[in-house]
Image (cartoon, helix red, strand yellow):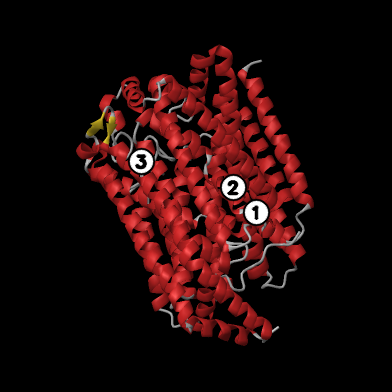
Amino acid sequence: MTTRHDESSVYEQMQANPEFQELRRRYRNWAFPVTVAFFVWYLLYVILSAWARGFMGTKVFGNINVALIFGVLQFVSTFLIAWLYARHADRKLDPVSSRLRAEIEGDAANE
Amino acid sequence: MSNQTLSITLFLVFVFATLGITYWASRNTKSAADFYAGGRSFSGVQNGLAIGGDYMSAASFLGIAGIIALSGYDGFLYSIGFLVAWLVALLLVAELMRNSGKFTMADVLAFRMSPRPVRTAAGVSTIVVSIFYLLAQMVGAGALVGLLFGITSDAGKAATIIVVGLLMIVYVVAGGMKGTTWVQIVKAVLLMTGAALVTLLVLAHSGFNLSSLLGEAAQQSGKGEAFLNPGLKYGTEAAGLAGKLDLISLGLALVLGTAGLPHILIRFYTVPTARDARKSVIWGIGIIGVFYLLTLVLGFGAAALVGSKAIAAQNKAGNTAAPQLAQKVGEIMFGEVGGTVLLAIIAAVAFATILAVVAGLTLASSSSFAHDLYAHVFKKGTATERQEIRVARIAALVIGIVAIALSIPAQSLNVAFLVALAFAVAASGNLPAILYSLFWKRFNTAGAVSAIYGGLGSAVFLVFFSPVVSGKPTSLISSANFAWFPLENPGLVSIPIGFLAGYLGTVLSKEHNAAKYAEIEVRSLTGAGAEKAVPH
């Protein structure tokens, strides 16, 4: 068992490692903009529900109006983002994080 | 056989099956990781189902179907907030939390902070949020039994609350996270099956023509066209600007609250890796999303087939819309017996729903009490694992008894607002603390404590001075008026306060720990040093 100080320094070294920084960049550059996007898209829906009721009540076909379609689109976008994120994480994040994890845990075991 | 006897029989089958599972789970619950996190050995799919079982409360099953049945489209606004919220959990919280935490929400917050003040704040917030949510569910259980089984006496309702409370205590004390998770999985399967069955019958009845179902619903609701548009319940034109801001405020609390609910957060610890945590949230999103699409059909179907008037006559909030619809559509399709059977099934499913959710809440609050307050604050980390689990079990018992004791006198009060308040507190206090902990290097103890108390305090304070508590005939205290805050939902103000308090608390204090931030950042993204599953 190493001391706490040594263990931390493994993490600090890793934080400075370009490969780790690439992993962080790949994660953040995907998750942050998409979070902003779905949040704005959801707020738009709530705001239109409060202030643009004429528009939301417009019938598109039969009794199906814009409000219902907009609501269902929120479901569609949620499912789509979940699926896209899973794909992104599988392809772009998991291989790097597994490699770095093995590196850190290997280091810790050798110390 | 009457529908009551059949309902009770089905409910008893559920109770015995889940007690059997709990007994099995208790024999496999030895370590703290078993009790708090189910040994971290659930698969992504299993945990995804449990997430659904934990999240889809009676408020969302009966409540949303009821709101749609009485006020039309507005109930859908609730569903959408509840669902979109899961993206916050998926993209920003679930995996990072699984990698850097152990048993409770506070594990992540206390990672690089001074542990005692942060764990105290997180423990208080966890217990407050869980108790609010728990009370709403248990009072709802009392009301539900009255409606479904014709038990209208206060003693009968009190007896129901006691039965629900005792069962939840047994699940948690004996089964810990393993037992609770299995109860939630079974419930999720039953709820999805029941809701899908009724939905299918409703759609078959309307010739799978959604447009004609909506038209019939609008007609039978007595509200006409407006029934299909937003605005009958939330942000009505009569309520003016305050009403519309209230709608935005509710929307914000729903979408940001989920990823701060302690009973949801601890679910991420029940799987072996962050990858499984991600998978479980994706499954959860699928299940919860489909479920809310089903409730849309159930709500409009109830308005169309039962009629809003008949629903409101049985319960003003529309909470019996789904069971009434089950009976009606069963009768239409299969005659009287069909109606009786379907009503009994849906009533039993509704009880299973309540039980699974209250068990999750009791587990979250007792875990936080034992792990955060007892082991780390009172004992400063010197408690043994055995002592900690013992305290967790005693805490579950005490919290269960307190919840029963508070729910019985609260029966005559309108406590439905407590669910929205729990979401508002989670969004205002917990979420800023979690996000800052995971992503902001400079964040520190003062910031974490300020965010939690600032968010929690402002949300509760504003609700106290809102029309929810006083000033209106529907208020908690309708005889007085000290409501100067115009919104019923505090989120619009309290969420920015929580984030701002966390920011100010941080920059006004010099403390920060760069080495520990490096550790949490690397660990949260790579999974190095993450807690492993318990081997069997």
Residue that badge 2 annotates = B50
On screen, residue B20 versus residue B403, left or right, reads right
Question: Disc 1 sits on a residue from what chain?
Answer: B
Cα gap from disc 2 to disc 3, whole angstroms: 24 Å
Residue in the image at 29% along x and 38% along y: A67
| Circle 2 Cα neighbour tier, 10 Å, few/some/many (<14 / 14–19 / ≥20) | many
Question: Disc 3 sits on a residue from what chain?
Answer: A
Question: Disc 2 sits on a residue from what chain?
Answer: B
Quadrant of the image occupied by residue B534: bottom right
**Mark 2 or 1, closer to the camera:** 1
Determine if marks 2 and 3 fall on one subunit: no
- Identify the amino acid type marked 3: Val
Where residue B58 appears, as percent x and y from the top left, is: 53, 37
Residue that badge 3 annotates = A72
**Mark 2 or 3, closer to the camera:** 3
B262 or B101: nearer the eye? B101
Relative vertical location of residue B221 with respect to residue A28 in this rendering, above or below: above
Residue that badge 1 annotates = B42
Where residue B7 appears, as percent x and y from the top left, is: 63, 25
- Identify the amino acid type marked 1: Phe
Find the residue positioned furthest to the right: B27
